[in-house]
Amino acid sequence: MKKNRCIILLFLFCGFLLLSAPRCLRAESSSDVAATQSQSAASGTAASPQDASVNLTARAAVLIEGNTGTILYEKNKDTELVPASITKIMTLTLIFDAIDSGKLSLSDSVTVSEHAASMGGSQVFLEAGETQTVETMIKCISIASANDAAVAMAEKIAGTEENFVKLMNEKARELNMVHTQFKNCNGLDDNIESGHYSSAYDVALMSRELVIKHPEISNYATVWMDQITHKTKKGETQFGLTNTNKLVRYYDGITGLKTGSTSKAKYCLSATAKRNGVHLIAVIMAAPNHRVRFSEAQALLDYGFANCSVYENKFENESFENIPVKNGTPDSVPVAPPSTFSHTFTGDYLPDEIEQKIQYRELTAPIKKGEEIGSIAFTYQGKSIGSVPLYAAQNVDRSTYTDSLWKTARTFFRLSQKEPVRE
């Protein structure tokens, strides 16, 4: 009897363990999920499969695709923060704008003022009265983040730094940078209370403007080490430049761009890279240290390249018929081969579902060679993904009275040469 009681108790004990074990496991699993959700909320990472693998400690960050401007990742992207030297991205943008417009050339001389020479912080120790070329100043700004060179260039372009800052803010409004205001051209002594601030997304917008519109910036921003020559009354001396962006040493496809750090801003970085036609811009703001800003920017870039792909059409096997031109001589115009169309997809896509539609406007002579006469519109699953213009390949003059008579005569002659229909 005692033996039977022991067996019954043993079975009851085992049953208790089996019933209670799943509850323990479920409780542990729920605890882990809650902890993960809490950690995600604290870091600002969106709780979605798209960016679940990216978990940043920087206060604000954003990743955008440069060709389309699509936001791939965001964390506090519109929070207004102290930008430090990534301010100089706008300064460089205006410098290259001035070069494109013909106002400046790379070989122009820049004379350093007392004000520019007095800048502290990161600098190349330019002396008042010293002259350097525009290209040398660009090197100093983009490689060594030189505050003195930035101010010297601001004065060269706008007369004073104050006037240049007005241009910076005008450009910011043009780029729809709604969470940005500049008070200086270099980010030195930046202070939100005084009105110098920006956001991660705004930094991405001006970075995109610089690298897409002026890709030649990469010729400077990716240089690891260089040197300049100081020419002063004391003679000539060499000064070494070392890039503050460590990613240029090892990240595949890096194209730039700019670092920044102060005690208020902490550690900031706008990192740009390109692979297989995909342009990415990763912005990190207020990272706790310089190692984190580089590792987290790299993590964002890696994520972007893993999730983006480019569709490209070079129109190599396509032909275009001549387009009729009213009152023209000749009476039609050939179409010039269109430029390559490309679109970056932020995820998988089905090439067979990309459609294109050619549209021409009604043409009336005269038509000039290179004049836009139509376009090819591209759609994916019914949604527009862009277009390319079509241009006239030659001039078409307006028909004269004599041209019209000859055209009528040729038409009559062709009709008269046709054999009569036999019944």
Image (spheres, rainbow, N blue to C red):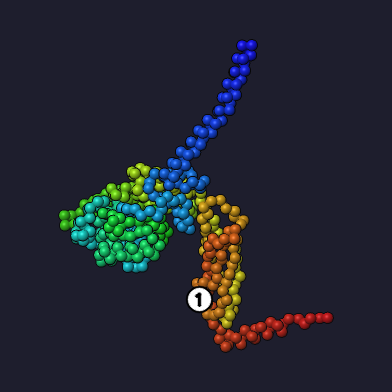
Return the residue nearer the eye: 3 or 332.
3
Residue 259 in view in this figure: yes
Furthest residue toward right = 423
Look at the image and tell me in which quarter the C terminus lies. bottom right
Residue drawn 47% across and 47% down?
46
Is 396 rendered above or below residue 115?
Answer: below
Residue 222 in view in this figure: no
Task: Specify the quadrant of the image occupied by residue 104.
Answer: bottom left
Residue drawn 60% across and 76% down?
324
Return the residue nearer the eye: 69 or 93.
69
Return the residue nearer the eye: 114 or 11.
11
Task: Specify the quadrant of the image occupied by residue 299.
Answer: top left
Residue drawn 31% across and 50% down?
265
Residue drawn 57% across and 82% down?
327
Is 58 rendered above or below residue 323?
Answer: above
Horizontally, is 378 left or right of 96 in the view?
A: right
The amino acid sitting under disc 1 is Lys
Measuring from the top left, give residue 361's x and y in whole percent.
Answer: 56, 74
- Residue wearing tag 1: 368
Measuring from the top left, give residue 4's x and y in whole percent.
Answer: 64, 14
Task: Specify the quadrant of the image occupied by residue 41.
Answer: top left
